[in-house]
Image (tube, helix red, strand yellow):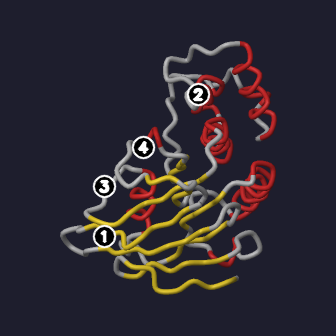
Amino acid sequence: MINLRQLEFNYKQMPMQFDLQIRTGEKVALIGASGAGKSTLLNLIAGFEQPDSGQIWLNGENHSHSQPHLRPVSILFQENNLFNHLSVEQNIILGLQPNLNINAEQRQAVLHIADKVGLTPYLSRLPEQLSGGQKQRIALARCMLRDKPILLLDEPFSALDTALRQEMLQLLAQICRDKNLTLLMVTHQPQEVGHFVDHTLTVDHGTLINNQVL
């Protein structure tokens, strides 16, 4: 599902090279020191950075140089990237339509995913009226609504307290099971995700140095 073949990115302070294979439905944690290249790896897969050489195969197709919106990928950052002037419902709808114009079938999909993540009572509220965990639920719902088979997470829960992180991981586990998602997530709490992921990968100075079953 994710296949990186001799992927090279010539970042000026630290050239990076990645080879990686993740099968359909696998959940993988990505760990390493700050600045090791974890976020860059996600951005290469998502298409926000372009490799200098090598290939990116996603869902059986070559996406080495395709635009981000054409890739079978959703990405969720630590900062949830919500629009504070839009309601919870409108922020979720952005996952389907940037102009917010949706049909009846799409609205049902929005309501369904909002219920899935426990946001139904808050759909008319603004993000500033919600807790940190609820804001991350909005961003997660938006990713889920895009219905892409690959989900990339860049420390999306690290700013939350322990209880909220566990709650979000339980929700994520349910969604991954329901949709058979392939997941690659950056984390600084590997001990907290050990029961959830299938493997952990370590990034060190721009390269993957191990592949360990947790």
Give the residue displayed 54% in from the left and 48% down from the top: 73
Pinpoint residue 135: horizontal percent, then vertical percent: 62, 41
Pinpoint residue 203: horizontal percent, then vertical percent: 45, 78
Q: Quadrant of residue 206?
A: bottom left
Labels 1 and 4 touching (C-beta < 8 A): no
Q: Quadrant of residue 137?
A: top right
The disc, 4 or 2, on the residue closer to the chain's N-terminal end is: 4
Choose mark 2 or mark 1, whichever is in front. Answer: 1
Q: Which residue is mark 1?
A: 8
Pinpoint residue 57: horizontal percent, then vertical percent: 48, 59
Q: Is residue 197 left or right of residue 100?
A: right
- Disc 3 crowd rating (10 Å Cα; few below 14, some 14-19, many 20+) is some
Q: Nearer the viewer, residue 69 or 204?
A: 69
The amino acid on which the numbered mark 2 sits, given as a three-letter code, is Leu
Q: Quadrant of residue 37?
A: bottom left
Give the residue displayed 57% in from the left and 83% down from the top: 211
Residue 119 sits above or below residue 18 on the image = above
For the residues labelled 1 and 4, the Cα–Cα distance comes to 18 Å
Q: Which residue is mark 3?
A: 50
Q: Which residue is mark 2?
A: 96
